[in-house]
Amino acid sequence: MQNDNVLLSLNTISQRYGDSLIVDGLSLSLARGRIGCLLGPSGCGKTTVLRCIAGFEEISGGEIVINGEPVSTPQHHLPAEQRRIGMVFQDYALFPHLTAEQNIGFGLHKLSRTERKIRQDELLTLIGLNEAAKLYPHQLSGGQQQRIALARALAPRPQLLLLDEPFSNLDVELRERLCHDVREIIKREGTTALMVTHDQHEAFAVADDIAIMHQGHIQQWDSAYNLYHRPVNRFVADFIGKGVFLQGVVLEGSRVETELGILEGELHSPCARGCVVDLLLRPDDIVHDDASPLTAAVIDKAFQGADILYTLQLKSGVQILSLVPSHHNHAIGQAIGICLVTDHLIAFNPELGE
């Protein structure tokens, strides 16, 4: 039975290109008003999934349901133009011979001239570009073009908005600023959206729900917080954020003995006593503490403005990472005091990766 709060459902969809299985039994549900993201490395199948949802490609198996209506099965394919989907492409695809205002109004031909003008002005105000209404795409910056492309996609009030690597053509500083702006614009319109990206910073900044994809499968569909702090497998742990793995032995309950001492916390992956595990340690788990008897040697450092990311070496030769406020500026080779702050322990069986 269809959940009325769910706008988009992918039910074990598959897609092949010849003999190659690109998407393999993938499922997810996106609630109304939420922004989802398909995040993964190149070649994982995320763009193929987006194209299937948009109706640009037929699926080999499973079912795509939008607003309670099956739009794609192996036997049925609703044409893209009938799906009420807005699309923001990687290159924006603005019409060069139309002004910003005319680009936004391109899909509003069913409205009267007055209604179209009202909607164009409304969106120009929403994206903060009223002054650019009469300018052509070549007269706009990359960030302005991206806003116009977003406004054009939102103009017909689509039931679903799809964004394909929308920030990839922008420089890093502009990308960070626009991630926040795009999220705000989509939320103000109350639109349900699904974005594709390979950049986790973009995913974290824009999306409510994120799917980590690998080899045509979703590894984890979750919040950014849980992906970072509670990865379900080794691939997600490696892909999201920075971190290292430290070997330990489970004692009992939620206690694990390691080179850094006995760690306690919520053991995310319970193991029997004596089980050898790899513990995931994030840079923010390793805290610099001059008073700590536990020390590690600085072997590398990366200045990041407010923080320095230190690569530290333990006495055994094992390397760990620590994010430290940048006024603690230590030299390469210097030993510094450290302590661990771990609220929950993420342990993986080194043989299974789980």
Image (cartoon, helix red, strand yellow):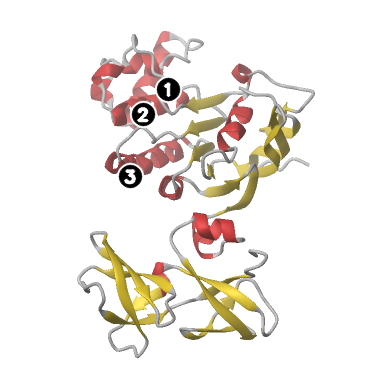
Residue type, mark 2 in image: Gln
| Distance CA(mark 3)–CA(mark 1) | 22 Å
| Distance CA(mark 2)–CA(mark 1) | 10 Å
* Viewer-proximal residue among 198 and 142: 198
Residue type, mark 1 in image: Arg
Q: In this view, does 260 lie to the left or right of 222?
A: left
* Badge 2 element: helix
- Residue at 30%, 74% (x, y): give it: 298
Q: Position of residue 175 (x, y in %)?
A: 33, 40
Residue type, mark 3 in image: Glu
Which residue position holds label 1?
A: 152
285 vs 142: above or below: below
- Residue at 72%, 21% (x, y): give it: 77
Which residue position holds label 2?
A: 146
* Badge 1 element: helix
Q: Where is residue 328 in the image (x, y as percent from the top left)?
A: 22, 74
Q: In this view, does 258 lie to the left or right of 289?
A: right
Q: In this view, does 217 lie to the left or right of 119?
A: right
Q: Where is residue 320 in the image (x, y as percent from the top left)?
A: 41, 71
* Viewer-proximal residue among 25 and 31: 25
Does label 3 or label 1 sit earlier along the sequence?
1
